[in-house]
């Protein structure tokens, strides 16, 4: 199963490397310290004197003016291997230099060398070594760990090469007494310090950093209230087409309080085609309607589409007064002093499907404003409030609006789309609040069809990055089922009370679900560029072309 599929192109990989990995890794590296180093020297002759058993301990190292930077986007290798090259130039390694040795002072007296007793010396100085360049090559492996059910980018190796500048042995060090013609020890200190810098453990902190970023992906699917989406690997696995891009399938689907959503035929979406190197989009993502159905199901399980309405919940409280309807239905007269409570419960979770429809959003209406005479355009102002599932439904509306049929073709062409359609069935019960142990009731079934509109990416109230949508009502039908009221004639009553009492409140509940939206997999530190994303409904899925942004916080 895979309800989400993703293709990431060269632009996306480069952005990820430059803006997220490079930024965070170079910040991390700038705080690393070189390891301690111990140097041993047998003896230095100082005129007639000498220093022996010299031990130099370089401790408490730090790096100054160390500003590593990515040298270029990682070069992609086979099987998900990437190479990240980071360089830092013109920096210093600063150490605490402690030298201990045995000093024997000797002097010449009438052609005879005399020596004092050996003395133990222990001196501490500051040692600064300049470096021209540190070049760090980090190998990364992008994979999915099936054993842990987790995405991962691991450092498979790192290699550092430090190029030192001129050695700067402390001016008061005993080593300054070395024979100037012998540069061996200076070179030895030089090389030892370079080795210490190169031996810094770069891999462990980088691994820890990247692991934390990747582990943040599952959190992007947590909508709160017990609703969690699964972003494990899908049927297609993780692919690297031509070693010049990434394709992956993601399971998708949701669970509510640990119980997973399931349908008889879970989808296995095709992978988006690899993005070309010239395509500036970072990624192309397909999102199946299975993801929307999972949201519908989870919302239903959580009771978020069930409503209980009392008079005070309505703009017009009289809509729930029995007396409002006694003229329409005489059998209600004995209860005229009471109010009703409206109860809406889903019979089953709403489901989506794809079909052609006629939807008149801003783009369609702007086009028609240019194409139609102003007097005809005035007649169709009601179009955006509706969605039409068939050509005949639209033409019936236009006929009622007195639009001449010579304009039908232009209007139909402007609104024709491939649409995702939401079908719902719910119980709409009215209970008369007369205080009796068994209160009189009226049971109605409402079947409703909406078209999802205004698809966009956005941030919901729980700070999830989601695919969001609105709804345009296409059909509402209320069917009388039964009543405990003697002589009650339900069909006409049912058609009147649903729009009067509950339709607006139910539409508000749908809008809240659409504003919550379907979460999309993304790691911490990145956000989709909501304003430039291109969403289009295809047969079986929504295609999203998008860029991402780095949140430097």
Image: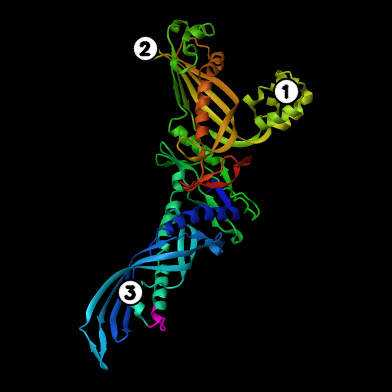
Q: Earlier in the sequence, mark 2 or mark 1?
A: 1
Residue 33's place in the image compared with 407, above or below, is: below
Which residue is the extreme one toward the right?
A: 406
Q: CA distance from mark 2 to mark 1?
A: 53 Å
How busy is the neighbourhood of tag 3: few (under 14 within 10 Å), some, or many (20 plus)?
Answer: some
Contact, CB < 8 Å: mark 3 with mark 2?
no
Q: Earlier in the sequence, mark 3 or mark 2?
A: 3
Q: Nearer the viewer, mark 3 or mark 1?
A: 3
Residue under numbered circle 2: 435
Residue under numbered circle 3: 173
Residue 297 in view in this figure:
yes
Residue 352, position as x, y percentages in the image: 56, 35
Residue 193's place in the image compared with 338, above or below, is: below
Residue 464's place in the image compared with 29, above or below, is: above
Q: Nearer the viewer, mark 3 or mark 2?
A: 3
Residue 252, position as x, y percentages in the image: 50, 45
> What kind of element bears circle 1?
helix
Residue 420's place in the image compared with 408, above or below, is: below
Residue under numbered circle 1: 377
> Was residue 376 drawn as part of the magenta stretch in this picture?
no
């Amino acid at each position: 199963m895979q309800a989400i599929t993703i293709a990431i192109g060269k632009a996306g990989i480069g952005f990820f490397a430059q803006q997220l990995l490079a930024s965070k890794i170079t910040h991390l590296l700038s705080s690393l310290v070189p390891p301690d180093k111990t140097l041993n020297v047998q003896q230095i002759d100082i005129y007639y004197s000498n220093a022996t058993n010299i031990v130099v301990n370089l401790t408490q190292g730090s790096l100054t003016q160390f500003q590593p930077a990515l040298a270029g986007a990682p070069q992609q290798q086979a099987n998900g291997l990437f190479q990240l090259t980071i360089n830092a130039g013109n920096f210093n390694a600063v150490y605490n230099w402690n030298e201990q040795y045995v000093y024997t002072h000797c002097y010449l007296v009438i052609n005879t060398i005399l020596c004092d007793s050996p003395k133990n010396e222990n001196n501490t100085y500051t040692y600064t070594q300049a470096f021209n360049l540190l070049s760090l090559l980090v190998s990364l492996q992008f994979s999915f760990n099936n054993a842990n059910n987790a995405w991962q980018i691991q450092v498979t190796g790192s290699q550092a090469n430090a190029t030192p500048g001129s050695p700067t042995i402390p001016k008061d060090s005993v080593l300054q007494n070395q024979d100037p013609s012998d540069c061996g020890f200076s070179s030895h200190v030089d090389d030892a310090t370079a080795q210490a810098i190169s031996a810094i453990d770069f891999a462990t902190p980088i691994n820890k950093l990247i692991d934390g970023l990747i582990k943040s992906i599952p959190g992007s699917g947590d909508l709160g209230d017990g609703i969690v989406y699964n972003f494990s690997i899908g049927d297609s696995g993780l692919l690297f087409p031509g070693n010049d891009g990434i394709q992956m399938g993601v399971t998708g689907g949701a669970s509510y309080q640990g119980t997973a959503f399931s349908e008889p035929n879970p989808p296995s979406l095709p992978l988006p085609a690899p993005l070309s190197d010239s395509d500036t989009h970072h990624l192309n993502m397909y999102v199946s309607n299975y993801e929307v159905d999972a949201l519908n199901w989870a919302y239903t399980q959580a009771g978020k589409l069930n409503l209980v309405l009392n008079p005070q919940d309505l703009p017009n409280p009289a809509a729930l007064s029995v007396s409002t309807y006694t003229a329409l239905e005489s059998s209600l007269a004995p209860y005229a002093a009471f109010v009703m409570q409206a109860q809406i419960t889903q019979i089953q979770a709403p489901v989506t499907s794809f079909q052609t429809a006629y939807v008149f959003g801003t783009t369609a209406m702007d086009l028609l404003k240019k194409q139609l005479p102003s007097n005809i355009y005035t007649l169709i102002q009601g179009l955006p409030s509706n969605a039409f599932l068939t050509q005949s439904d639209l033409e019936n509306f236009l006929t009622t609006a007195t639009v001449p049929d010579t304009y039908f073709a232009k209007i139909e062409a402007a609104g024709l789309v491939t649409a995702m359609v939401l079908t719902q069935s719910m119980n709409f019960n009215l209970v008369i609040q007369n205080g009796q142990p068994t209160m009189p009731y009226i049971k109605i079934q409402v079947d409703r069809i909406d078209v999802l509109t205004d698809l966009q990416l956005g941030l919901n109230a729980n700070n999830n990055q989601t695919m969001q949508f609105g709804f345009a009502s296409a059909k509402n039908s209320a069917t009388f089922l039964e009543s405990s009221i003697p002589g009650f004639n339900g069909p006409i009553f049912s058609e009147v009370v649903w729009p009067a009492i509950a339709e607006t409140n139910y539409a508000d509940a749908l809008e809240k679900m659409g504003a919550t939206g379907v979460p999309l997999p993304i790691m911490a530190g990145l956000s989709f560029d909501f304003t430039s994303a291109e969403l289009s409904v295809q047969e079986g899925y929504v295609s999203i072309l998008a860029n991402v942004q780095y949140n430097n916080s």
